[in-house]
Image (cartoon, rainbow, N blue to C red):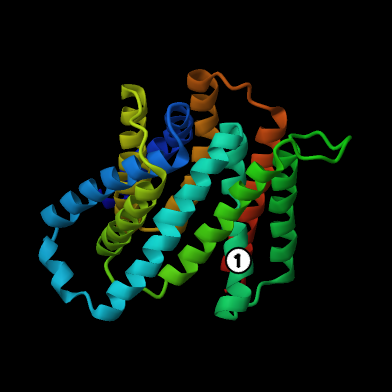
Amino acid sequence: MNQRKAYLYAGVAILCWATVATAFKIALSTMSNIDLLFISTFSALIVLLGIVSFGKGIGRLRHVTARQWGRAAFMGFLNPFLYYLILFKAYALLPAQIAQALNCIWPVLLVLLSIPILGQRIPFMSVLALLISFAGAVVVAFQGDFSGLSVKEPFGVFLAALTSVMWALYFILNMKSKLEEEVSLLLNFLFASVYITLLICFTGFQVPVLKGWLAGVYVGLFEMGITFVFWLKALNLARNTATIGSLIYLFPFLSLIFIHYLLGEEIYTSTVFGLVLIITGILANQFIIRKSK
């Protein structure tokens, strides 16, 4: 029964994440990346407050130490504030399919960053697997056209790749957190709401049309808030977390369907091929690491 629930929660999470790239572009067609971050951050904060309150209670915050509050202030600046500020800008500059594919290389960068930060060693075969993923990222960035060896939107590609570095770094740093995941997320968004409010005070807030509001709230709920809780529940209920974890790589391909039919983007063959390479390399590396252990 628990395994069935795990697959159900995982399926809901994957379906939600498959729609957010489309929601990003819809929202960004009506507002700036800063305004979108403002709306989505507060939407996520409200839903996380509800989740924590109706779970084990908001009283858990009384047990958070001063050091943990300080850590949450830094982590909230890194993610969601800075991470999504840059990610939304990347989506504003690039086709959704390109930005999403480049954002998917974070597991590769996670492995590479774990070498200097955590002192981990990786097998030689893992290096080959990671090179496959990087080759996929190059195919996506160049959109399959290597004749002129030029990236069509280099700044957007740089920002999308940078978000993968930031997410991998956030993941590594968050491994040391002793807070419950839901409480940790709540604190991160609490501080992020302060940061984005201060930024809005300088930039101003342009009130979007209704479509923009709805898309922004959707991003806050289903990219930042509820979906992470569904995913955590799936991992906690699963008999084999590796099996459930591997399912997450279905969402980029499902997302292409929404991007094509809702945004009207023509899906490049290079995007699909690049994604296949990226995810093949990631899954191969995970298999190699598990086998070596």
**Secondary structure found at label 1:** helix
* Above or below, 202 relative to 271: below
Compare residues 81 and 170 and report the one nearer the observer: 81
**Label tally:** 1
Q: Amino acid at mark 1?
A: Val
Q: Residues within 10 Å of mark 1 (few under 14, many from 20)?
A: many
Residue 63 placement: quadrant:
bottom left
Residue drawn at the location 40% of the way across and 66% of the way down? 75
Q: Position of residue 287 (x, y in %)?
A: 60, 60
Residue 8 picture location, percent across and down: 32, 41
Indicate whether 5 appears above or below 123: above
Q: Is residue 95 left or right of residue 246?
A: right
Q: Quadrant of residue 181?
A: bottom left
Residue 63 seen in the figure = yes
Q: Is residue 178 visible?
A: no
For the point 37% across and 41% down, the residue is: 204
x, y percentage for residue 74?
A: 39, 68
Please provide percent x and percent y for residue 128. Answer: 75, 60
Q: State the residue position of label 1.
A: 111
Image quarter where the C terminus lies is bottom right
Is 82 in front, or is 17? 82
> At 62% across and 77% down in the image, what residue appears?
116
